[in-house]
Image (tube, coloured by chain):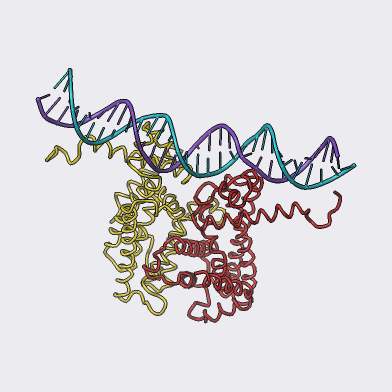
Chain colours: A yellow, B red, C purple, D cyan
Amino acid sequence: MVFMKSTLTRKQREVKEREGRILELARQMIVQDGYHGLSMDRIAEALEYSKGTIYQHFSCKEEILMALVNQSMQRRVDLFRRAAAFQGRSRERMTAIGASSELFCQLYPDNVHVEHAIRITSIKEKASEQRRMCLERCEASCSEIVRGVISDAVAAGDLAVEGEVGVEQVAFGLWSLTFGGYSIAATSPSLANLGIHDPIMAIRNNCNRLLDGFGWKPLAKDLDLPALVERIQRELFAPELAQLAELNRGRARRG
Amino acid sequence: MVFMKSTLTRKQREVKEREGRILELARQMIVQDGYHGLSMDRIAEALEYSKGTIYQHFSCKEEILMALVNQSMQRRVDLFRRAAAFQGRSRERMTAIGASSELFCQLYPDNVHVEHAIRITSIKEKASEQRRMCLERCEASCSEIVRGVISDAVAAGDLAVEGEVGVEQVAFGLWSLTFGGYSIAATSPSLANLGIHDPIMAIRNNCNRLLDGFGWKPLAKDLDLPALVERIQRELFAPELAQLAELNRGRARRG
DNA sequence: TCGTTTTTTGACTACTTGTCAAAAACACAC
DNA sequence: GTGTGTTTTTGACAAGTAGTCAAAAAACGA
């Protein structure tokens, strides 16, 4: 076949669509019963295909995990990129990245579980080179975007790096704080008992304290952060906010 | 038997000793191949007991995980308690807790993996009420110790809490930063490529930046932190330091 | 030495991932 | 429609898990 009516044959589209359904179901399974709840047998049964067909899409369980995490990570990179392009001072741009991170975690709450899963077992080793590279590229992109903003801050004289503190130190601090915070929030059911009722705001606040500690100007007290975040959301992430509102409406309806 | 020669019969001691061997082996398995590498069959085979005997000690895999984590957590509580008793200003005492945390992670590096594992699958649900309670008590103890020092700081006027910032907020910040930092350090092999060559020092530095951001006096710049940490280690954790040195010597010899 | 209690065993069930030869579905020429 | 070659789908199969339980073995007490 030299040329095709569409970019894909009917069959190919069908297969693609099935792949999506597999991933969707896998995501649900992981959310419900954790990594252990993900079973190739049950996927095949639920989708009314034989196991062999599922294995034609994903050569092992780990491939599904990696596909899921890559799906999310690509969206995260997109959000980060748009955030870093925010017009303003370096600290405002970093606030935009923070806002995009919050949005990401709210839009794709399942992702926390999946990301946890790939960090535990030796999943990366079993997955294909291709999928591993994809994840690495996404992570590198995120890291680079963040470090870019930090470097800009240094260049603009808003942030002083000296001695032990380097661009990487700041990036690692933010990464630890957000990754740790969201992980705890997702896996510690009794966080409210410990006095944290709004984890997202708590994490946002902690990030700002950390940046203040690094002396990144303007300091939090010199910014109207609520207004800034509101503006960022409005200017950069209007579609995502609408999507989130829709999602919450659906959740409220369901229970 | 109304009274016994020893507190335990010979048989009971034998059983206790075996339980220790099971846990030791399980820990090794988890370190080597992650949660997936832990197999009841293989434990039985390696220890030359039948599976049934292993199941007499631990009714399921999750019980082993929980036993391991409890083992570590009890040691952590002990370290935290001793750290909080350090004589000095509130921030110095918090530095002592930080030092104890560093020590803990170095003495029991396997624990990071185990703690990760119990956070992922629904292990807590499957484990016995007893073991679950034990873990909860340990976590509560750690949290309480940290919050105690923070409260003391507030009472002494070294730290101002107002508005959104409460004692819990500071505690959550430190928890996120250390948990996240050590998790990333343990599971991201390429951290050095990202410019972080000494994760422990990086995490320590970040914690101090965060506390500076909260305005916890004396600020890092007004303290001789290296000297303080050295003093804390010498005064409070001499035995653990020796243990660690021994451990490192062993590691150096092996590889 | 013998009966009783406790401990240990390994075959068993029910599940998992992953493979692969054979069967079914499909595409296409005539 | 019919025949033919290719692709896709299937489900029985191997090899490995967790956990159970009746029966065998060991320990104990008299």
Residue A145 to residue A8: above or below: below
Residue A157 to residue B61: above or below: below
Q: Position of residue B101 (x, y in %)?
A: 56, 67
Residue B88 to residue A240: above or below: below
- Image quarter where the N terminus of chain A lies is top left
Q: Position of residue B87 (x, y in %)?
A: 64, 76
Residue at horizontal 42 percent and vertical 67 percent from the top: A173
Q: Position of residue C6 (x, y in %)?
A: 75, 43
- Total residue callouts: 0
Of the pair A137 and A153, the residue shown nearer to us: A137
Q: Position of residue A232 (x, y in %)?
A: 32, 58
* Residue B163 visible in rendering: no
Of the pair C17 and B110, the residue shown nearer to us: C17
Rendered image quadrant of residue A52: top left
Relative to B78, is B11 on the left or the right? right
Residue at horizontal 43 percent and vertical 60 percent from the top: A178
Of the pair B7 and B230, the residue shown nearer to us: B7
Relative to B1, is B180 on the left or the right? left
Residue at horizontal 30 percent and vertical 51 percent from the top: A238
Of the pair A132 and A196, the residue shown nearer to us: A132
* Residue B20 visible in rendering: yes
Relative to B228, is A125 on the left or the right? left
